[in-house]
Amino acid sequence: ILNVEQSPQSLHVQEGDSTNFTCSFPSSNFYALHWYRWETAKSPEALFVMTLNGDEKKKGRISATLNTKEGYSYLYIKGSQPEDSATYLCAFISGATNKLIFGTGTLLAVQP
Amino acid sequence: EAGVTQSPTHLIKTRGQQATLRCSPISGHTSVYWYQQALGLGLQFLLWYDEGEERNRGNFPPRFSGRQFPNYSSELNVNALELEDSALYLCASSLRTSGYNEQFFGPGTRLTVL
């Protein structure tokens, strides 16, 4: 059974704080790692798709790194803003299956 | 460009009934995915359709089935509904059949089984 774990489960930070979350996944038969942001009452929105060991991706204040050999990815948010409040989900694909296996997410709350 | 659409938004059924959920992908997307988020659980992969064929399914009983139409829209059918089928069902679509492509999600259908 493939397991994707995310930590922490929830995080409360002040506006302006920088934060990071961890996604752990099986290191064997890696194909891709997706990050999604899911705001309340909206649909999950893709942030990054990461495929190569050592990948680093950035979108504005959000960036992510990938280590496929040890099976983890970090998501960083620099200078958190209230609009960053959401659940951040990572999803792992093993082999060429297109089957996303989601972690349970990290709930981020940014207080003004 | 229109996003992924799902209907209905909410659906209330009783145990033993059948539910049909619909999804229209983004224009040009051939792959459609279905996910379930039951209360207190994460998103669970249900089904993947591409070019009208079922390509993969998650660990769900055969009561969960679906199909993809020639216009790439999709239907999810849940037969013999059970209370634990109450959940948010999300549909997603992607361009081509590759795990390297991000999935675009619809707003979901909330199914309540009484």
Image (cartoon, coloured by chain):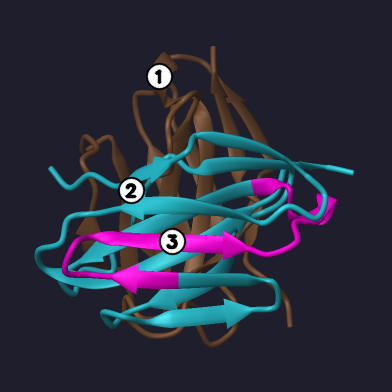
Q: Colour of chain A?
A: cyan
Image quadrant where one finds the C terminus of chain A: top right
Q: Position of residue B45 (x, y in %)?
A: 34, 49
Q: Secondary structure at mark 1?
A: helix
Could you tell me the amino acid type at mark 1? Answer: Glu
Could you tell me the amino acid type at mark 2? Answer: Leu
Left or right: where does residue B80 sit relative to residue B59?
Answer: right
The answer to whether residue B100 is above or below residue B67 is below
Q: Give residue A71's quadrant in the image.
A: bottom left
Q: What residue sits right under mark 1 in the picture?
A: B84
Q: Measuring 43% from the left and 56% from the top, which residue is drawn there?
A: A90
Image quadrant where one finds the N terminus of chain A: top left
The circle drawn on residue B113 is none
Q: What residue sits right under mark 3 in the picture?
A: A74
Q: Secondary structure at mark 2?
A: strand
- The subunit carrying tag 1 is B
Left or right: where does residue A77 sit relative to residue A51?
Answer: right
Q: Can I make out residue A63 in this image? A: yes
Q: Are marks 2 and 1 on the same chain?
A: yes
